Amino acid sequence: MAAQVAAASRSGLRSALPLLAPAYLWLTVAIFLPLSAMVFFSLMTELPLSGKPWAFTLENYTAFFSQSLYLTLLLASLRLGLEVTLWCIIVGYPAAYVLAKVLKGRSREAIFLLVILPFWSNGLVRIFSWAMVLREGGILDTALNAVLPFKINIDLMYSYPAVIIGLVHSYVPYMVLTCYLTLQAIDDSLIEAGRSLGASRLQMLKRVIIPLSMPGLVAGAALIFVPVVGSFMEPRILGGRTGTFYGTVIEDQFVAVFNWPLGAALSFILLAVVLVILAVASPVLRRAM
Amino acid sequence: MATTRVLEWLGRLYIWLLLAFLYVPIIIMALMSFNVSPFYQLPFEWTTEWYASLWQNDQLISATWNSLEIAVITTIICVVLGSAASLALYRYEFRGKKFLQALLFPPIAIPWLITGTAMLIFFFGVGIGRGLFAILLGHVALALPYVIVVASARLQTFAPELEEAARSLGANQWQVTNRVTLPWIMPGVIAGGLFAFAVSFDQFVVSYFLSTPGQTTLPVEIYAAIRKGFTPEINAVSTIIIVVSMALMLLTARFFKFGGEK
């Protein structure tokens, strides 16, 4: 019996292989080999193809640990990721709740589509649109001064809050989407039962709704946190000189300083940190499912 | 129950505030592309001169063509390779299948900064170098997992009895695939294709690391322009991009949701 199953699964592979091979070959050449190559190059003094002599070294990694700059920036990026994630929860979770439990029928469908539509549009362009709003003499400045009786100066551009606003704008649809999916799955009769047994709204939220929607919160947080830690374009455009983060330093190694081995090491460290965080998050996800 | 009504009303208000937060900057950015003042000064005066001057900007136009070309080729390759792979994953049982399915997630989950720099190093190392071909290689790899996931989701709703029925009625493997299975997964494949187009057309990070001065895509060109200084021309281009990609996503939503699920 086992032999039969094994034989069947072997023949299954034989039939599947021609269909699978092109796709997985492509992924190997363009994703998996490059990621392995990055690890390899991060252990070198020079790129082998640059013509200069090269050798294996741990220098690029010791650079990370010996110069506090990199660690500081990585921590700054992790903090940025955490803050953006928190803001996305604060902004996105109530919206997901209203979508899942208050709105009904066609208006729910339409608004749901409207909420997730922007995140399929170009991220770069959306960040640029915030530059229009936040500049001194920009729209926010002009609009507030037109309404308010006193003169205020709004110049958020090139500041930390600007980076946060831009990133929250870019990533909050993820949180709405994942929380909506789990909130929608909560049976309304469960909420009614709790209420009729005398639970207050706050108690219901704390004891029933938030625990049941935890998988959505965790999934959304992972989807937001990971790319934000690696972001470089948003801090560059909205943060200006205050927008130096771990991602922008990696970018610099590749497009400005041309120290690719160091860039590879910094990238790999980021990858490791990200993988550890995902690994920590995944059991929470699986248990909650 | 008055409290409930007040809370519901507040909830609706909140949603509209969120929508304002999401759309107002984009709308302002788009409006500014029709404003006369190159320094975005108000009052607003209508003009289309920034769109007209786009036509004079050869660099932007060639970058736009590159973006479109790469997106179209990416879509075609992803649709072909992606439907083949999802069909195989659906139809056959074999050892290591779970592993192959799990391999689809790293390309989606790993930040593009890491993937992009890794591609740069590797392509440079093996002699492919940078440029449009490298960008195409990268885009296909980024979009392919999405296409496989979307097409597989559609296949989950497929009844294998249909294939068996066709076979028992004398259809050969090719006919079964061509006349029964493929028409069924078509909405998934189309949605996946539109998805692939959007991933490629909007892709900035990976293109950025793989482009060279002559061979860039539109987002890379826009990034360079933003860093040089803001001009309403960037607004004009951005407006076009945002309209195109939102229209594409609306199409995708239509195909994926209403695509014959009866």
Image: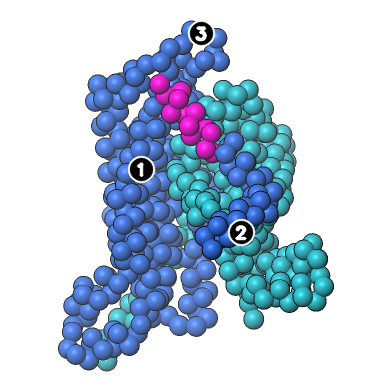
Chain colours: A blue, B cyan
Q: Chain of mark 1?
A: A
Range of magenta residues:
A31-43
Residue for point 70% across, 39% down: B66
Secondary structure mostly seen in the magenta stretch: helix
Q: CA distance from mark 1 to mark 3?
A: 33 Å
**Of B161 and A178, the residue lying toward us:** B161
Which of the image's four quarters has the C terminus of chain B? Answer: bottom right
Which of the image's four quarters has the N terminus of chain B? Answer: bottom left
Q: Quadrant of residue B163?
A: bottom right
What amino acid is labelled 2 in the image? Ala
What amino acid is labelled 1 in the image? Val
Q: CA distance from mark 2 to mark 3?
A: 53 Å
Of callouts 2 and 1, which one flags the residue occurring earlier in the amino acid sequence?
Answer: 2
A223 in relation to A67, above or below: below
Mark toward the viewer: 2 or 3: 2
- Quick check: marks 2 and 1 in contact, CB under 8 Å? no
Q: CA distance from mark 2 to mark 1?
A: 39 Å
What amino acid is labelled 3 in the image? Lys
**Of B36 and A91, the residue lying toward us:** A91
Query: Going by the image, does A243 lie left or right of B35?
Result: left
B15 in relation to A37, above or below: below
Q: Quadrant of residue B191?
A: bottom right
Residue for point 33% across, 40% down: A273
Kindly state the secondary structure of the residue where label 2 is placed. helix
Residue identified by numbered label 1: A274
The label shown at residue A52 is 3
Residue identified by numbered label 2: A8
Q: Is residue A40 magenta?
A: yes
